DNA sequence: TAAGATTGTC
């Protein structure tokens, strides 16, 4: 019964039966453990999983490969890398599933580098990677925007004849999109003989992330015609696509169709999408009303989205309300403080801004440093704010100044709002505050031959000044510049950006 | 009778 409920993904019934076993004093065996551990993994019940782990040791099942594989997956997927390796390393015989447990678990818990490390290790030993292995590895490479590694994995996939496996193809569509090459995604999509709901979701999301809302909506309409059934993930893609291109009414219609036409109950993330849709378009009072009337408690994402829009549209009152709720729910998250402080900065309320920074300091919250990187000649070059660590730092800063002058000649004015307050600006050396994406773009222009598009990755969101600056630079240098920030892609060309300044 | 996969809001 336990196994059957587990296979049906009926987690609560699995837990109920396991507890009943305990109460009745029945001893779990080599079939019980893998099943209940899988249930723990799927529901993120790390604490219960750990307790079961001690039971495994006590009853001597820690030599069973099925039990250990289930433990490896549990720890890897809960982001407990050390514990996952500990169980894995203690196993006498490891099969392909043991390796996959690490790779897929690390990939799903956001430890992408770790996932690729294990994948590369696996290729040095005598275990053949399976379709499962490649699916997870491709996904990890995509999330890191590791084009090089992605292409290597793709060659391995092709060599083994796995290239028409639908799950791998789906992962490849996403990987290409995340590496900035939507045309490769499209090619893969078109050549797939068989498509499922995930295939359509991957393509819709790819267009959405690249700011092509119309293509995303087209694909959604085609998905419905094709017979694939839209799910919760589909609507995240469709709603964000509408949001990014300002299709407010269409977005609302799609949101309402979730329940009416597709029998889907919207989740917190869908409410956050609608808040984004309304507030990004400047309809802040409608957004506020929508949040107040939500049938479920607004989650941090809802407030964060609202706060971001309040910064763009300079609505301090609503912004403060959103910030208060956000900081109550997530007092540890540095991004929330940065948003609030930016809001005060754009409205030039330096005192409040400084109070926010002070609050951060008192609570021991530190901002994640901004970092941009770019690949040139098989090497990754990374930059922090104002750093002069690069071997070519002098040339980069010299060329940056030239670019700034040329940009200023055609109308670029630097916007200091997100950087410093007035007093600080007078005192400090402004070159200390050059954002990392400016350094990366400047370096790329110095190093890459004409005609090659520049692809910069950034761990945080690009700020409005850098966004504006890159538009000017794309015009001056006559280059295509693609910036992948933490949330989406910006394609800059001839002074314009694909996001239409709407991000 | 047991273990591993793809798509996701700022």
Image (cartoon, helix red, strand yellow):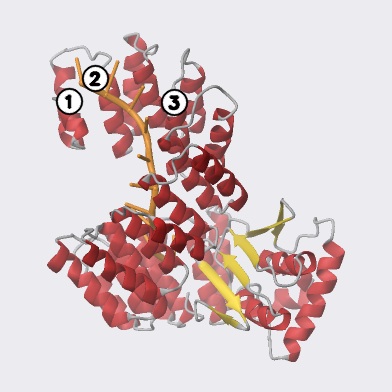
Q: Nearer the viewer, residue A19 or A116?
A: A116
Quarter of the image where the N terminus of chain A is located: top left
| Secondary element type, mark 2 | helix
On the image, numbered disc 2 is attached to which residue?
Answer: A32
What is the x, y in percent for residue A198?
32, 53
On the image, numbered disc 3 is attached to which residue?
Answer: A96
Instruction: Kindly give the residue lying farthest to the top in the view shown.
Output: A60
- In primary-sequence order, the first of circles 1 and 3 is 1
Q: In which quarter of the image is residue A469?
A: bottom right
Disc 2 with disc 3 on a shared chain: yes
- Using the image, determine if residue A343 lies above or below residue A406: above
Q: Can residue A213 be seen in this view?
A: yes
Q: Is residue A53 left or right of residue A452?
A: left
Q: How crowded is mark 2: few (under 14 residues within 10 Å), some or many (20 or more)?
A: some
- Using the image, determine if residue A137 lies above or below residue A339: above
Q: Which residue is drawn at 57% across and 77% down?
A: A345
Q: Which residue is drawn at 82% across and 73% down?
A: A399
- Using the image, determine if residue A438 lies above or below residue A333: below
Q: Residue A202 carries which label?
A: none
Disc 1 with disc 3 on a shared chain: yes
């Amino acid at each position: 019964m336990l196994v059957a409920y587990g296979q049906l993904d009926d987690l609560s019934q699995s837990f109920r039966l396991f507890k009943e076993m305990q109460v009745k004093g029945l001893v779990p065996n080599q079939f019980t453990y893998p099943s209940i551990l899988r249930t723990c993994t799927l529901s993120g019940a790390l604490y219960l999983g750990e307790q079961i782990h001690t039971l495994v040791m006590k009853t001597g099942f820690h030599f069973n490969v099925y039990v250990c594989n289930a433990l490896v997956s549990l720890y890897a997927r809960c982001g407990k890398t050390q514990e996952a390796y500990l169980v894995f390393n203690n196993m006498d015989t490891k099969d392909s599933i043991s390796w996959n447990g690490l790779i897929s678990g690390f990939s799903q818990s956001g430890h992408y580098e770790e996932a690729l490390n294990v994948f590369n290790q696996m290729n040095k030993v005598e275990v053949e990677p399976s379709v499962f292995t490649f699916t997870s590895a491709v996904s990890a490479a995509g999330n890191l925007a590791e084009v090089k590694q992605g292409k290597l994995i793709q060659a391995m996939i092709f060599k083994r004849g796995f290239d028409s496996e639908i799950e791998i193809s789906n992962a490849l569509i996403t990987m290409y999109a995340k590496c900035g090459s939507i045309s490769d995604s499209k090619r893969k999509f078109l050549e797939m003989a068989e498509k499922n709901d995930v295939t359509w979701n991957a393509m819709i999301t790819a267009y959405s992330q690249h700011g092509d809302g119309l293509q995303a909506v087209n694909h959604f309409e085609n998905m419905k015609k094709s017979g694939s059934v839209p799910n919760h993930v589909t609507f995240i893609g469709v709603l964000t696509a509408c949001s990014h291109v300002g299709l407010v009414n269409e977005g609302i219609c799609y949101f309402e169709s979730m329940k009416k036409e597709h029998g889907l109950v919207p989740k917190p993330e869908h409410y956050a999408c609608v808040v984004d849709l309304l507030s990004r378009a400047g309809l802040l009072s409608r957004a506020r009303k929508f949040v107040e009337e939500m049938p479920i408690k607004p989650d941090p994402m809802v407030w964060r989205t609202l706060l971001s829009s309040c910064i763009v549209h300079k609505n301090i009152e609503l912004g403060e309300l959103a910030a208060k709720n956000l900081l109550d729910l997530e007092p540890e998250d540095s991004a929330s403080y940065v948003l609030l402080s930016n809001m005060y900065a754009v409205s030039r309320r330096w005192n409040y801004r400084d109070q926010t920074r002070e609050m951060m300091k008192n609570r021991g919250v530190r901002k994640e440093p901004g970092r941009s990187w770019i690949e040139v000649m098989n090497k990754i070059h990374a930059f922090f704010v104002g750093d002069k660590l690069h071997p070519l730092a002098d040339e980069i800063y010299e060329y940056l100044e030239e670019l700034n002058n040329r940009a200023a000649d055609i109308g670029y004015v630097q916007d200091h709002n997100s950087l410093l307050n007035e007093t600080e600006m007078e005192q400090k050396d402004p070159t200390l505050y050059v954002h990392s994406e400016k350094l990366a773009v400047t370096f790329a222009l110095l190093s890459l031959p004409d005609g090659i598009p520049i692809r910069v990755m950034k761990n945080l969101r690009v700020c409005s000044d850098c966004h504006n600056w890159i538009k000017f630079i794309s015009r001056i240098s006559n280059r295509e510049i693609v910036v992948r920030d933490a949330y989406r892609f910006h394609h800059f060309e001839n002074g314009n950006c694909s996001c239409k300044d709407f991000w």
